[in-house]
Amino acid sequence: MRSQRLLLVTTVAETLNSILRYQPKFLSDKFELALVTSPDVEIDKLSDREGVHVFTVPMSRGINVFKDLISIFKMILVLLKFRPMLIHSYTPKAGLIAMFSGWVCRVPIRIHTFTGLVFPSANGYRQKILIWVDRLVCACATHVVPEGEGVKRDMKSHNITQKSLDVIGYGNIAGVDTWHFSKDAIGISAIALSLRGRLGIADNTFVFCFLGRLNFDKGLNELIQAFVRLSNDVHLLVVGNLDATAPPDDKTLAQIKSNSHVHEIGFVDDVRPMLLASDALVLPSYREGFPNVVLQAGAMGLPVIATNINGSNEVIEPGFNGWLVPVRDADALLDAMQHAILQPKSERARMGENARRRIQERYERQAHWDRLVQFYNDLIKSNN
């Protein structure tokens, strides 16, 4: 019996352990819920934390027809065993495997959320393949959810699907716990102060923070080009692991390691002290779906300098809670960083207050979870 069984699918467990953390636990009180993701050493911990069963299906991130066929076969076995009424996938490969398998098994409600599109930044034959795959995912899904309005516009402009495209709320897939992401959270201020002291950063010194994978598409090349030209006594925190599959260029990586004012922090479980130790977040990405770091920084009361791309430009309003600059434009990024430094402290504080208020009003995690439950219930009702 299907009842109100819901199956959530992600390509890797990291998505469930970070971005979607605790969302399955909340949903399990409303639905008979299970998860599907690739095998991982922390699957048992994930299952215990969320209080749900986790099925494992290996899913490779690249295009590999043989491996993908195996993934589809194993996903079909999961669907035949669990028999969900709804299946909801996030991330590209999970979407392909879950939606095709769900179509084969005739799962009544098949939802895929597009968290970011790769094809707009691709070229030639690769772009055509990516567009074809996205169209296939949409053809197999009964409902298609763009993560934000920018993703929705790109899907429409490239005729990815003729199906209705409905963003849930203001966008994003998780929301932000603004009680947790708060500069007033217990103990965070002391850790942030200790971090600055350990790095040799004076109290009145301006600090920028980059938060994310050290990936070519994150715009680190332009960030470092702009940072080294700043004349002020400023520092930069680089928080995140190197993405060896698509790293920034060698010159950029060398400058990150050699510049005494650039601090390579690496990956951290709790980014709040890094944000609180900073005066502004910088995210000069070439593409995003809906960047969580922009929401987290805003919740911590930080203005944000970001590129004018999907997601970022749905949160950042120039002069209100940050600055927007063109993609791949180191000169424009330099101007925005200089402007941030020269802003009176009271003005940056005002922008920070605006940033937090916007996150609370539009992207509070509990409100997003409630909207998601309503979304599922409406689909179940219309299916009966």
Image (spheres, rainbow, N blue to C red):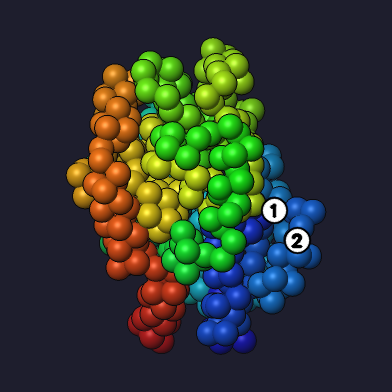
Residue at the outermost front position: 203
Vertical comparison of 30 with 333: above or below = below
> Pointer 1: residues within 10 angstroms few (<14), some, or many (20+)?
many
* Residue found 61% across the figure and 20% down from its top: 257
Q: Nearer the viewer, mark 2 or mark 1?
A: 2
Q: Which residue is mark 2?
A: 43
Q: Which residue is mark 1?
A: 38
Q: Left or right? Give the position of 76 relative to 44.
A: left
| SS category of the residue bearing label 1 | loop
Front-lying residue, 1 or 120: 120
* Residue found 40% across the figure and 58% down from its top: 299
Front-lying residue, 231 or 299: 231
* Residue found 47% across the figure and 40% down from its top: 203
Total marks drawn?
2
**Residue 165 visible in the shown view:** no
Residue 368's x, y, as percent? 40, 70
Residue 160's x, y, as percent? 33, 46
Identity, as a three-letter code, of the amino acid under mark 1: Ser
Q: Earlier in the sequence, mark 2 or mark 1?
A: 1
What is the C-alpha distance between the residues marked 2 and 1?
9 Å
| SS category of the residue bearing label 2 | helix
Front-lying residue, 44 or 58: 44
Identity, as a three-letter code, of the amino acid under mark 2: Ile
**Residue 239 visible in the shown view:** yes
Q: Left or right? Give the position of 231 relative to 193.
A: left
Front-lying residue, 3 or 293: 293
Residue 21's x, y, as percent? 58, 64
Q: Quadrant of the N terminus?
A: bottom right
